[in-house]
């Protein structure tokens, strides 16, 4: 009898549970759903991205909602916020969101499960980030939470195609091949369009011929697919390698000189005058906008008259009207021709608080403008080293630019600035392979005094520091053929006038009178000599107190030492130099940086007691 009652009770419970599930499914049909498109791999930080699918979410009310990401700590059962400050992540008008998941590492810090909650912002008013715990979430979220296991997410994700030659600057005629995993197929385009949706997308086969050009760009966008699933889009870009016979590979260019404000309507003739001194200094120039200050004229003059390559920048902020005006400015630049070599949408958007969704929308708008051009123009974006790039943005980019300022905006010691910059570039470029990575800004101010950086430490801008940094930078670019833009061509007084830091006006290689600063002249006059093509001299010790020795001297060469103004301060004839075994006494010279020239070989020494 008890058994029959138990069976009846179980049947009733089953029916009730089924009815509850049915009722929940009806209710869930109108509830918000969290769909995750990207999450950082286990043990790493990065950006998690997704979308809220909900019919009631509109562009007008999106600001009322947010997504919270929480990670279960392995030393306890609380869910904790991945960042301490910005605990609520905005949802845009289409439901997209991105959250910087900072927890990485290993052991206790390698957290696999990440849970996402869709909430009303008002529910958490006044709550500090790290105090939001799992226990306080009850009843505060809309729809159902979404928990994603990172190891499972990445194990099930298809990888994009891999090229046989890494994107970058290569010789003409190289044969590019693509490969995926067994059983995967590849679709690709070469016109800059999306291989998932473009009518020009075709299937890649082993017989497909993709050759690097002598002029222009080879831009391949490709995806792998298997069983109806697709990888992320790989944007693979190759540009022609050219000999570097100028001091700089690239220079950042702003023509707001001598107190002129940003937005000053510089004439075409004035633009031409200010660009002319750069023609013999650099191969490439990079701009930061499309409106005023000569920006509407720079691309045309640089390419048609000065034989320069151009990266034209689109200045992006949170002002939609201003962004639209910038894109319209690009349209006018393209209509006047010729096409720029590269287009960069946004600069340091992570610092400006521009959301990935807004940046992605601007990139899409630029693509629409660019696709009418008869040639392929690669489109990229620029941010600081260490920025957490959104995957939705990365998929849209043909290249990324990296701004690096070790020793200027951080506490890196002066003696380590160049080494830190080089390592930062190598690390960032490796992180995003096979996407092309350019060093788009680096430099050191020559004036502005002492100022405070992170942790309350101080840095001091000075001519010797700036000269040493520039010298090390140029040596590295030439020795390793690095595509790098130096910051910058001209001093910009307008920056410190508009509330910027005092040092910001002193980064220029040239002054407001269009003249190279005297302390840079010696470096730039010798930087066009490619040391690896000649007999290399190696001074030791370096830095030197009184006496140093030169090895690798060209046979029969005399020696001259120049200070940074270009003045010869010491000479030694070939016989004396040979008899001394290359030993040179500079005890009579003041501390500083000097250039040593023997024959066609040049090296740098630093005298320091």
Image (spheres, grey):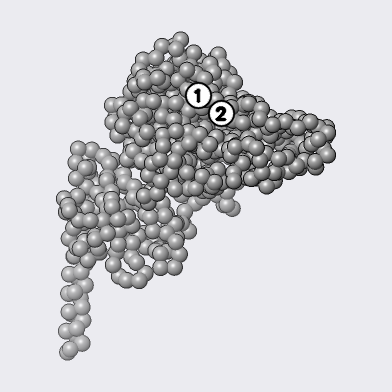
The residue located at (70%, 43%) in the rendering is: 548
Residue at the farthest front position: 588
Q: Residue under circle 2?
A: 520
- Quick check: marks 2 and 1 in contact, CB under 8 Å? no
Give the residue drawn at x 44%, y 33%.
Answer: 447
What is the quadrant of the N terminus in the image? bottom left
Q: Residue at x 69, y 44 (%)?
A: 547
Disc 1 is placed on an element classified as loop
Mark 2 or mark 1, earlier in chain = 1
Viewer-proximal residue among 206 and 68: 68
Residue 581, position in %: x, y? 80, 42
* Above or below, comparing residue 437 to residue 108 in the picture: above
Q: Is residue 595 visible?
A: yes
Q: Nearer the viewer, residue 278 or 358?
A: 278
Residue 341 visible in the current orientation:
no
Number of residue marks: 2
Task: Spot the residue most to the bottom.
Answer: 1
Q: Report how far apart the C-alphas of labels 2 and 1 lie in the structure.
A: 9 Å
The x and y percentages for residue 218 are 58, 31
Residue 184 shown left or right of residue 86 in the figure: right
Viewer-nearest residue: 231 or 553: 553
Per the image, the residue denoted by label 1 is 510
* Image quadrant in which you'd find residue 44: bottom left
- Few, some or many residues within 10 Å of mark 1 (<14, 14–19, 20+): some
Mark 2 neighbour density, 10 Å: few (under 14) some (14–19) many (20 or more):
many
Circle 2: element type: helix
Q: Residue at x 39, y 25 (%)?
A: 493
- Answer with the quarter of the image where residue 559 lies: top right
- Above or below: residue 90 compared with residue 256: below
Residue 335: where, in percent of width, then height?
44, 16
Where residue 407 appears, as percent x and y from the top left, is 47, 44
């Amino acid at each position: 009898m008890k058994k029959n009652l138990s069976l009846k009770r179980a049947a009733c419970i089953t029916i009730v549970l089924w009815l509850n599930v049915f009722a929940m499914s009806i209710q869930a049909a109108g509830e918000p759903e969290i769909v995750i498109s990207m999450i950082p791999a286990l043990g790493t930080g990065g950006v998690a991205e997704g979308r809220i699918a909900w019919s009631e979410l509109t562009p007008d009310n999106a600001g009322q909602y947010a997504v919270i990401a929480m990670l279960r700590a392995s030393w306890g059962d609380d869910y904790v916020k991945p960042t301490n400050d910005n605990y609520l992540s905005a949802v845009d008008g289409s439901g997209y969101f991105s959250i910087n998941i900072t927890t990485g590492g290993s052991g206790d810090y390698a957290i696999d499960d990440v849970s996402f909650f869709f909430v009303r912002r008002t529910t958490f008013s006044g709550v500090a980030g790290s105090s939001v715990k799992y226990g306080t979430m009850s009843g505060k979220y809309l729809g159902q939470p979404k928990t994603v296991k990172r190891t499972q997410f990445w194990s099930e994700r298809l990888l994009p195609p891999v090229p046989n030659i890494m994107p970058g600057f290569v010789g003409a005629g190289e044969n590019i091949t693509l490969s995926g995993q067994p059983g995967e197929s590849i679709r690709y385009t070469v016109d800059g369009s999306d291989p998932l949706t473009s009518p020009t997308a075709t299937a890649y086969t082993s017989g497909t011929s993709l050759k690097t050009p002598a002029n222009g760009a080879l831009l391949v966008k490709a995806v792998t697919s298997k069983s109806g699933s697709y990888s992320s889009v790989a944007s693979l870009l190759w540009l022609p390698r050219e000999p570097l016979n100028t001091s700089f590979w690239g220079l950042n260019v702003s023509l707001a000189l001598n107190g002129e404000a940003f937005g000053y309507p510089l004439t075409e003739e004035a633009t031409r005058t200010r660009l002319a001194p750069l023609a013999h200094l650099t191969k490439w120039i990079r701009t930061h906008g499309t409106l005023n200050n000569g920006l509407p004229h720079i691309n045309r003059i640089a390419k048609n008259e000065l034989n320069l390559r151009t990266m034209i920048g689109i200045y992006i902020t949170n002002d939609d009207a201003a962004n639209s005006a910038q894109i319209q400015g690009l349209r006018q630049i393209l209509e006047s021709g010729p096409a720029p070599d590269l287009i960069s949408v946004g600069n340091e958007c992570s610092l400006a608080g521009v959301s990935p969704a807004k940046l992605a929308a601007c990139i899409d708008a630029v693509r629409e403008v660019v696709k009418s051009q008869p040639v392929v123009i690669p489109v990229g974006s620029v941010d600081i080293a260490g920025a957490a790039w959104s995957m939705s943005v990365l998929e849209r980019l043909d290249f990324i630019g990296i701004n690096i300022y070790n020793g200027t905006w951080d506490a890196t010691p002066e003696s380590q600035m160049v080494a830190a910059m080089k390592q930062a570039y190598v690390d960032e470029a490796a992180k995003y392979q096979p996407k092309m990575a350019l060093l788009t800004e680096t430099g050191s101010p020559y004036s502005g005094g002492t100022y405070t950086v992170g942790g309350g430490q101080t840095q001091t801008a000075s001519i010797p520091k700036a000269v040493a940094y520039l010298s090390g930078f140029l040596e590295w670019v030439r020795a390793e053929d690095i595509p790098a833009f130096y910051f910058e061509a001209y001093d910009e007084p307008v920056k410190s006038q508009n509330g910027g830091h005092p040092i910001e006006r002193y980064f220029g290689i040239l002054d407001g009178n269009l003249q190279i600063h005297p302390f840079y002249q010696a470096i730039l006059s010798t930087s066009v000599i490619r040391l690896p093509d000649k007999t290399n001299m190696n001074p030791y010790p370096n830095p030197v107190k009184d006496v140093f020795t030169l090895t690798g001297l060209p046979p029969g060469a005399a020696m001259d030492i120049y200070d940074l103004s270009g003045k010869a301060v010491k000479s030694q004839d070939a016989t004396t130099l040979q008899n001394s075994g290359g030993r040179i006494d500079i005890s009579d010279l003041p501390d500083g940086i000097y250039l040593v020239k023997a024959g066609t070989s040049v090296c740098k020494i630093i005298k320091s007691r």
